[in-house]
Image: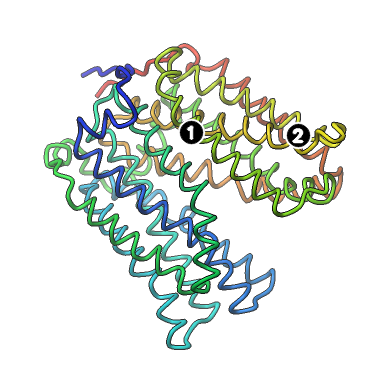
């Protein structure tokens, strides 16, 4: 059966939530969870640095523990998500994260807090977070129409962008009042509330389960990998996104060093830059639907990459702008964040549209493994390039990689497929 991803007519910010109660519950659950997570993103490292007084090596292990589950479990998680009902996985992941995160404030209250406990919490929470993201990404196409995918993803991204603006300030206030360990309790509560909203979703997945595969695990994983790299649109998006991910990781490695040590930008202005970028991300989330309606998700993704590459290419020259360097950096980051949000929404929507339901979990997991797996390699390369050639040169190299991603996509089947057709 062929399905086309058109773009639903515009009808206001809450049109989809008003017309689709299951999406409203999913959106509410994700929003509450995102807001709570913004507290932990700030507070958990502060528990390690301030409360436990650990060094750079321990912080490296803590960061690695958070991202390791993707490399270890993503492919198996994709198979499981394709074989099982996705709503129970979502609910269990939400409640599980709430329970795991609560160990930090509980341990602080009884005097059992240690860096080893933080490693365990980071690894377990990272595993559950991966399951949550993969399940929610695979579940969305089941509860919204294909023509509503861009709008649905845009609304979910809007929540993420909004919490990125409001969350850090609220988190800083809570950490200041309660201390870092107890502030994390807010995130724990948010996951339980998120789980309650997800529990109320009524969509019956029984029919979907009957159409999914009954294969051995290895064969199922191979089918997911084969489909991802044999399907022209999925392959092009994966390669393009991986190149963009590598470019972003190279840039991120030297970004703070360049802004602080070369441009003499103070921490408070770094925070302001982040808030403005978050605001631009909100604009991107709100404009994704009308833009996708006008040009198609494929072209929107390509143009967004071009804007990212231009912004990245201009940044190294900000030091030559004199007294305008700070406004220039703010403008550059705003353009980059807006484009990044448009790219994210369009590529997720297009991927969901071209992927048969029975393969969504494995396609999302395999793609996540490839795209996220390049980040440590690119980050290490960025550090080497920064030490060898300087920060400005490294930023230019990252921009060049982004332009390679843009060039690849504009020559690919994504360009000629603004509306995705999937055959199941």
Residue shown at 36%/18% (left/top)?
A: 420
Is mark 1 in CB contact (under 8 Å) with mark 2? no
Q: Is residue 62 above or below residue 147?
A: below
Q: Which mark is residue 344?
A: 1
Front position in the image: 232 or 86 = 86
Whole-percent x and y of residue 161? 48, 41
Q: Position of residue 421 (x, y in %)?
A: 33, 17
Residue most extreme to the bottom: 111
In this view, 30 is above or below 115: above
Q: Is residue 170 left or right of residue 219?
A: right
Apparent side of residue 102 relative to residue 270 in the rendered image (left or right): left
Residue at 40% in and 26% down: 350
Label 1 vs 2, first from the N-terminus:
2
Q: Which picture quadrant has residue 48? A: bottom right
Q: Which quarter of the figure is the N terminus placed in?
A: top left
Number of numbered tags placed on the structure image? 2
Q: Secondary structure at mark 1?
A: helix
Q: Which residue is mark 2?
A: 315
Is 248 placed above or below 240 here?
below
Viewer-side label of 1, 2: 2
Residue 405 lies, in percent from the top left, at 62, 27
Crowd tier of the residue under label 2, counting other residues whose Cα lies within 10 Å: few below 14, some 14–19, many 20 or above: many
Label 1, label 2: how far apart the Cα atoms are: 21 Å
- Residue displayed at 53% across by 66% down: 43
Viewport quadrant of the C terminus? top left
**Residue 342 screen position, x and y as percent:** 50, 28
């Amino acid at each position: 059966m062929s399905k086309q991803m058109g773009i639903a007519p515009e009808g206001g910010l809450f049109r989809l939530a008003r017309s689709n109660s299951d999406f409203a519950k999913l959106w509410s659950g994700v929003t509450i969870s995102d807001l709570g997570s913004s507290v932990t993103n700030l507070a958990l490292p502060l528990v390690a640095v301030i409360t436990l007084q650990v060094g750079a090596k321990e912080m490296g292990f803590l960061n690695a523990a958070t991202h390791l589950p993707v490399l270890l479990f993503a492919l198996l998680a994709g198979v499981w998500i394709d074989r099982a009902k996705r709503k129970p996985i979502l609910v269990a992941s939400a409640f599980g994260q709430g329970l795991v995160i609560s160990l930090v404030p509980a341990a602080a209250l009884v005097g059992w807090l240690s860096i080893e406990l933080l490693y365990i919490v980071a690894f377990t929470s990272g595993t559950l977070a991966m399951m949550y993201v993969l399940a929610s990404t695979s579940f969305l196409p089941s509860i919204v129409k294909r023509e509503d995918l861009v709008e649905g993803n845009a609304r979910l991204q809007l929540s993420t962008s909004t919490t990125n603006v409001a969350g850090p300030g609220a988190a800083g206030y809570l950490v200041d009042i309660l201390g870092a360990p107890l502030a994390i309790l807010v995130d724990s509560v948010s996951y339980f509330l998120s789980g309650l909203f997800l529990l109320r979703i009524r969509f019956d997945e029984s029919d979907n389960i009957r159409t999914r595969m009954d294969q051995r695990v290895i064969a199922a994983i191979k089918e997911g990998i084969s489909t991802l790299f044999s399907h022209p649109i999925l392959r092009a998006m994966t390669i393009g996104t991986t190149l963009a991910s590598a470019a972003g990781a190279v840039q991120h490695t030297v970004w703070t060093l360049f802004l602080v040590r070369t441009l003499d930008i103070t921490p408070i202005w770094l925070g302001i830059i982040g808030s403005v970028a978050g605001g631009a991300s909100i604009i991107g989330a709100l404009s994704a639907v009308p833009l996708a309606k006008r040009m198609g998700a494929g072209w929107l993704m390509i143009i967004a990459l071009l804007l990212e590459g231009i912004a990245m290419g201009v940044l190294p020259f900000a030091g030559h702008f004199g007294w305008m360097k700070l406004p220039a950096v703010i403008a550059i980051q705003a353009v980059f964040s807006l484009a990044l949000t448009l790219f994210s929404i369009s590529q997720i929507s297009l991927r969901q549209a071209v992927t048969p339901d029975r393969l969504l979990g494995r396609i999302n997991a395999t793609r996540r493994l490839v795209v996220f797996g390049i980040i440590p390699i690119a980050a290490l390369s960025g550090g080497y390039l920064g030490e060898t050639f300087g920060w400005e040169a490294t930023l230019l190299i990252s921009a060049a990689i982004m332009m390679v991603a843009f060039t690849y996509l504009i020559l690919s089947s994504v360009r000629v497929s603004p509306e995705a057709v999937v055959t199941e």
